[in-house]
Image (tube, rainbow, N blue to C red):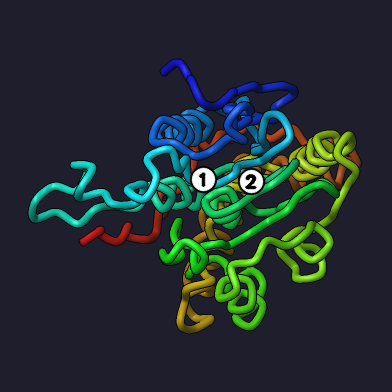
Amino acid sequence: MPYEHILYDIDDQILTITLNRPDNLNAFTPIMREELIDAFDKADEDDMVRAIIVTGAGRAFCAGADLKKGKDTFNYKLRGEEKEGELHRDGGGRVTLRMFRSKKPIIGAINGPAVGIGATMTLPMDIRLASDTARIGFVFSRRGIVMEACSSWFLPRLVGISQAAEWVYSGRIFPAAEALKGGLVKAVYPSDDLLAAARALAKELIVDSAPVSVALCRQMMWRMLGADHPMEAHKIDSRGITAMGQSADVAEGVSSFLEKRPAKFSMKPSTDMPEFYPWWEEPEFK
């Protein structure tokens, strides 16, 4: 599908998705929502994509939901988007759930203000970097609404319940330095250096790694965050070790180590995931 509100660019196995409404501070729209979901679908099926960077065009990352509809912005029933007898699905949650399922590592390059969905959409990304001009806000309480985009699941897991509570209850907007101190971002860079730093990190993640191994490890870690006992991890570890231990990638990984040469992994996430994948049943929305 052609994109109106995002840019999709692949260079050297790194996909950069750019939120592209700079005149509106990249405010989130239904069009952007559908385009982001489609972009992650496309990336998962494209074995030329090894890692994904998400950033914003212009001086903002994303200023949150587009509020042009004023006080009725979140009144989906009045706007005709909530059908009789059906529970409306949060659009931001649809995006973050799709990121959660990604087979490719995701890096957020938060280049400027990231507020509301602009902040919460970064939470299922594996690593977040920020520019020194970034300002972040979980502003729900200041709009009289509630946390969205599955952020009540993601945020406390990333920064701890106390830090999450402080940011969410107050709804205040805080600088990149505080995001770094609170564990939300890995590092802060001058604006002009941010994207280069994100690309260098992406390259580090993929240059010597096997794509199927990364895809499996990504899902193993994210999904074990909700497990009630380490036995759940042991079950999946055991399946993974058994399946991959017989694979061409493991044979190549061990041989290349012994022969002291770079590995050339041949397995593809689009076609060569082991039979036990996915090992989870996607919960039903109801």
Kind of residue at badge 2 = Pro
- Relative placement, left or right, of 68 versus 59 is left
Residue name at image x 59 percent, y 67 percent: 171
Q: Residues within 10 Å of mark 1 (few under 14, many from 20)?
A: many
Considering every residue shown, the one lying at the far left of the view is 85
Q: CA distance from mark 1 to mark 2?
A: 7 Å
Tell me: residue 106, above or below residue 4.
below
Kind of residue at badge 1 = Ser
Q: Residues within 10 Å of mark 2 (few under 14, many from 20)?
A: many
Mark 1 sits on what residue? 102
The residue lying toward the viewer, choosing from 88 and 254, is 88
Considering every residue shown, the one lying at the far front of the view is 71
Residue name at image x 84 percent, y 38 percent: 200
Which quarter of the picture shows residue 95?
A: top left
Which quarter of the picture shows residue 33?
A: top left
- Relative placement, left or right, of 38 versus 111 is left
Asked if residue 51 shows in the view, the reply is: no
Residue 253 appears at what percent x and percent y?
74, 45
Mark 2 sits on what residue? 105
Residue 170 appears at what percent x and percent y?
60, 73
Residue name at image x 53 percent, y 71 percent: 225
